[in-house]
Image (spheres, grey):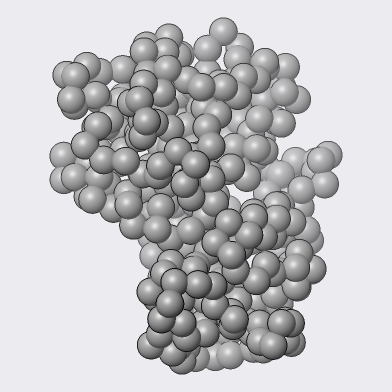
């Protein structure tokens, strides 16, 4: 019997019962293996440790009112990890193998799927890295793909409430034509110092500008940025922004609701024209933005003066969450029902 306070979970690691692993050796992927240990044996010269041959994904499983567990757009996570592997010259995980491993990991840890309306979900973390030894800078010949899970609460402790963010030009998250558009750990390592400074100043996250000119909106901390104005959903387009599956879904839902959608470079000065703004991603779904302070220029952009999310953000959030939990029709075929 679980002794978990579902309603007060943070977004942090918790041990589950099992994880699923698969090795790539001699030019081919092996069979899925189920392990109960949280630890892995890794060669000290593995390319994942030395040369950053590593990629990961994040998705969630949800317990519906009907008691069934649902995965949201797992096929898109499989495709994105495939692209990350190609970008770092790793052995790509076939889509079927990826999905089978994710489903198996969730099934083996069913008792950790939080109950309906608890405000929590089961976070699923697929991971791929170079496991073979190389001291020269070259791709590994062996890889480990694994999936582990844990129940989590909201990514931002405030939940679905507007938070303040900051802009600083002191740091770059990713270079143009670099690895910003694939999900590799190096991008997150590059954001840590800026994020730590933001938290120390009382902000939830950093809104990064483009690394080349510092004129356009880029990533929003660990998430994509979007703004709402004139019945239009606007989100930045850039080769250094990670393609967010949540953002992709919100774009479709915005269209379904009759909004126009614009995916294009978003100049910094355009922030002053948005009626609503938010960050979106798997972990946070939507984190509404109350205010963005440009601490270098001494300017503030305010989107919520009363501390409440905007009307359109609320509609999008409720619609997406409804689909994930099975409360809304899955008209686009996004959900995989496990049981």
The foreground one among 311 and 223 is 223
Is 107 located above or below residue 164 in the figure?
A: below
Task: Give the position of the N terminus as an image quadrant.
Answer: bottom right
Is 238 located above or below residue 306 in the figure?
A: below
Q: Quadrant of residue 88?
A: bottom right
Q: Residue at x 71, y 82 (%)?
A: 27
The foreground one among 43 and 257 is 43
Is 118 located above or below residue 91 in the figure?
A: above
Q: Quadrant of residue 185?
A: bottom left
Image side of residue 195 versus residue 148, left or right:
left
Q: Residue at x 28, y 53 (%)?
A: 192
Residue 246 visible? The answer is: yes
Residue 116 visible? The answer is: no
Image side of residue 177 versus residue 110, left or right:
left
Image side of residue 103 versus residue 16, left or right:
right
Q: Position of residue 72 (x, y in %)?
A: 69, 53
Q: Position of residue 131 (x, y in %)?
A: 51, 82
The count of marks equals 0
Q: Residue at x 57, y 22 (%)?
A: 264
Q: Position of residue 127 (x, y in %)?
A: 55, 70
Task: Give the position of the C terminus as an image quadrant.
Answer: bottom right
- Please identify the residue farthest to the front as the structure is shown: 136
The foreground one among 281 and 214 is 214
Q: Residue at x 46, y 82 (%)?
A: 134
């Amino acid at each position: 019997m679980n002794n978990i306070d579902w309603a007060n979970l943070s977004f942090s690691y918790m041990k589950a019962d099992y994880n699923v692993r698969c090795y790539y050796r001699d030019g081919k992927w092996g069979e899925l293996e189920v392990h109960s240990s949280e630890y892995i044996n890794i060669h000290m010269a593995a390319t994942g440790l030395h040369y950053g041959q590593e990629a990961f994904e994040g998705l969630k499983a949800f317990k519906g009112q009907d008691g069934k567990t649902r995965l949201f757009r797992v096929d898109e996570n499989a495709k994105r990890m495939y692209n990350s592997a190609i970008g770092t010259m790793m052995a790509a995980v076939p889509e079927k193998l990826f999905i089978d491993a994710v489903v198996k990991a969730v099934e083996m840890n069913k008792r950790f799927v939080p109950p309906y309306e608890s405000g929590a979900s089961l976070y699923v973390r697929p991971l791929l890295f170079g496991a073979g030894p190389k001291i020269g800078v070259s791709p590994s010949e062996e890889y480990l793909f694994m999936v582990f899970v844990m129940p989590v609460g909201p990514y931002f402790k405030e939940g679905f409430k507007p938070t303040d963010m900051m802009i600083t030009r002191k740091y770059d998250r990713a270079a143009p034509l670099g690895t910003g558009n694939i999900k590799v750990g190096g991008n997150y390592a590059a954001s840590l110092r800026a994020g730590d400074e933001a938290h120390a100043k009382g902000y939830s996250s950093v809104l990064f500008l483009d690394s080349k000119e510092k004129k356009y909106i880029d990533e929003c901390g660990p998430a994509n940025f979007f703004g709402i104005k004139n019945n239009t959903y606007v989100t930045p387009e850039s080769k250094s922004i990670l393609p967010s599956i949540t953002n992709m879904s919100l774009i479709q839902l915005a269209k379904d609701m009759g909004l126009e959608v614009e995916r294009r470079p978003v100049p910094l000065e355009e922030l002053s024209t948005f009626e609503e703004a938010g960050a979106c991603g798997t972990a946070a779904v939507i984190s509404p933005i109350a205010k963005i302070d440009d601490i270098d220029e001494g300017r503030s952009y305010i989107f919520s003066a009363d501390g409440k999310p905007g009307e359109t953000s609320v509609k999008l959030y409720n619609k997406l969450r409804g689909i994930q939990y099975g409360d809304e029709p899955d008209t686009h075929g996004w959900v995989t029902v496990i049981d």
